[in-house]
Image (cartoon, grey):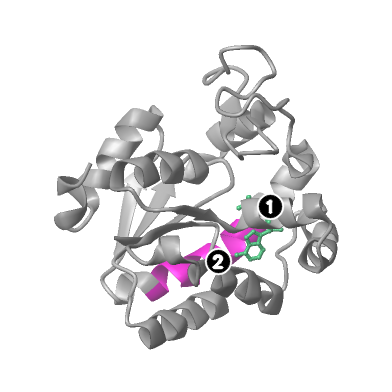
Amino acid sequence: MRLILVGAPGAGKGTQARMLGEQLQIPHISTGDLLRSAIQRGTLVGLQAKAYMEAGELVPDPIMIRVLEERLREPDCANGFILDGFPRTLSQASYLNTLLERLQTPIEAVVSIEVERDVIIERLSHRLICPSCHRNYNEKTDQPRVQGVCNVCGSGLTHRLDDDAVTVMHRLDVYLREIAPLKEFYRVDGLLRSIDGNASPQVVEERILASLPGTARTKG
Ligand code: AMP
């Protein structure tokens, strides 16, 4: 299954992509995680992306395209993948179509997770992330077993720098600017499914699975 998740920051794309990835046994590819890890490692891509990310702006397409193409060529993507955070613009979507056509592996579904703005702001103000394995937590609704420590890898949890109130508002505006044409692009292709994301992660996952083409649900 080759799947794209779209949704506002805080809509639950990362959480759903992780859960669906385990269920369908395909990798979860978050371009935000790839960039944060490039910044941590001090690579050229990390240096180029850092200022954009801290300001809540989109990283320029040429950088993003290079990051994504490199990741999609890794062997674990051969049986499918879940994209979280890419594409974010029409030009990224059309680049992705061209790339996947060349590889003869088209996208099979695009799931848009819809969540109200005040829920998003509340979620992001309590979000914690693991800088090592990228698992997300929430200080109120999804706490780690030991306070401040990742359940999966034991690293110390932090808030994302771009989850401060001012940057969150800007990221939401950037999202709203780009999302309508992007959804239209996939609606025309018959790939778009809109899912109500105002529910627990388990309920949202069920809704997404129920919306996917038949083969996806029989695995796992
Ligand atoms: P995310 O983790 O998906 O919320 O992404 C965090 C930040 O990484 C965004 O606010 C952008 O600065 C950058 N970013 C991630 N994916 C993309 C993309 N596909 N295009 C441009 N910028 C991106």
Q: Which residue is mark 1?
A: 171
Image position, residue 215 (x, y; %): 16, 56
Q: CA distance from mark 1 to mark 2?
A: 24 Å
Look at the image and tell me in which quarter the N terminus lies. Answer: bottom left
In the image, 91 versus 73, the foreground residue is 73
Residue 71 is tagged as 2
Residue at image coords 68%, 79%? 62
Residue 182 lies within the magenta run:
yes
State left or right for residue 197 relative to residue 93: left
Name the secondary structure under disc 2.
Answer: helix
Write down the region rendered in magenta. 174-185
In the image, 11 versus 22, the foreground residue is 22
Which residue reaches farthest front? 75
* Residue 63: quarter of image: bottom right
In the image, 21 versus 108, the foreground residue is 21
Amino acid type shown at disc 2: Arg
